[in-house]
């Protein structure tokens, strides 16, 4: 058996998240059906991040052990040929790795992108791929507030009630917001990086920062909410539409 590292891209809109579901609507289900089609039997996959329902990915990483003697290019082509007809999922990169590699436990850090558009007209071309808010946002104030998240903190306030992580302590090494000119017009982008995240942590932080952007909260209100370690102090939770798993970092 050869262990393979696969880098995936997918549109999460119509999926129930990464993890396999009883109704077969997880991204994992689709990928494993493709593996059955080319290997002849089920091979379990293991992912770096279990993205939630509706969350997208441009850099999800998984590993799988395969029995057949595949060349990397042939493996990528075979999987993509099957996936082309069964879901908006694509294998971007294939690499043979040692058995000691684990997509989840070998990861040193994960990076997410969150996209927002602050405009009154509804979305059309980007529907389901970006969060639209109707009121203009002050990105500088949002960045000032986001700076409170940097470093090591107890993120209980920004942790979903169903989170199964043993500890709410996380260390954020990056939280950068900027307004950019996107393909379909201006948008706000946030890039966040940490070794790992709590369930719905990024969406909870972004929903709260939106309150700052629209003037309902001050940056200090975010600091106080973080220090309160109380889920009831969290602002609204942003929808999954704008969230993308973009990077998983490993030791070279």
Image: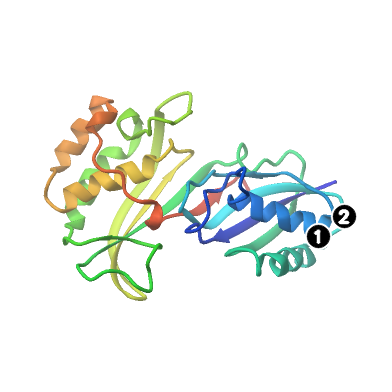
Residue 143: horizontal and vertical position, in percent?
A: 23, 50
Which residue is painted at 62% across and 43% down in the image?
Answer: 22
Does residue 157 appear to the left or right of 45 in the view shown? left
Residue 31: horizontal and vertical position, in percent?
A: 67, 55
- Residue wearing tag 1: 38
Residue 55: horizontal and vertical position, in percent?
A: 46, 53
Does residue 131 appear to the left or right of 221 in the view shown? right
Q: Secondary structure at mark 1?
A: helix
- Residue wearing tag 2: 68
Please say if the residues under marks 1 and 2 sit with CB atoms less than 8 Å apart: yes
Vertical relation: 10 (above or below) 111: below
Which residue is painted at 51% across and 53% down in the image?
Answer: 247
Vertical relation: 155 (above or below) 39: above
Which residue is painted at 16% across and 37% down in the image?
Answer: 221
> Which residue is more in the foreground, 68 or 26?
26
Disc 2 packing (10 Å; few <14; some 14–19; many ≥20): few
**Residue 241, picture quadrant:** bottom left
- Number of marks drawn: 2
Q: Secondary structure at mark 2?
A: loop
């Amino acid at each position: 058996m050869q262990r393979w590292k696969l880098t995936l891209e997918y549109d999460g809109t119509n999926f129930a998240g990464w993890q396999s579901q009883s109704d077969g609507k997880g991204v994992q289900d689709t990928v494993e059906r493709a593996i059955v089609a080319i290997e002849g039997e089920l091979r379990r996959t293991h992912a770096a991040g279990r993205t939630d329902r509706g969350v997208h990915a441009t850099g999800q990483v998984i590993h799988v052990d395969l029995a057949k003697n595949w060349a990397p290019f042939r493996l990528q082509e075979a999987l993509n040929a099957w996936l082309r007809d069964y879901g908006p999922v694509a294998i971007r990169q294939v690499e043979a790795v040692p058995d000691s590699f684990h997509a989840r436990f070998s990861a040193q850090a994960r990076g997410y992108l969150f996209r927002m558009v602050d405009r009154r007209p509804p979305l059309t071309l980007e529907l389901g791929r970006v969060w639209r808010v109707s009121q203009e946002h002050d990105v500088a104030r949002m960045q000032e507030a986001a700076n409170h998240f940097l470093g090591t903190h107890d993120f209980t306030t920004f942790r979903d009630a169903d989170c199964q992580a043993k500890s709410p302590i996380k260390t954020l090494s990056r939280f950068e917001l900027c307004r950019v000119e996107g393909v379909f017009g201006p948008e706000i982008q946030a890039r966040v990086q940490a070794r790992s995240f709590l369930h719905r942590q990024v969406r909870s932080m972004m929903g709260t920062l939106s309150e700052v952007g629209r003037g309902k909260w001050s940056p200090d209100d975010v600091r106080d909410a973080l220090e309160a370690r109380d889920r009831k102090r969290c602002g609204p939770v942003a929808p999954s539409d704008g969230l993308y798993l973009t990077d998983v970092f490993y030791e070279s």
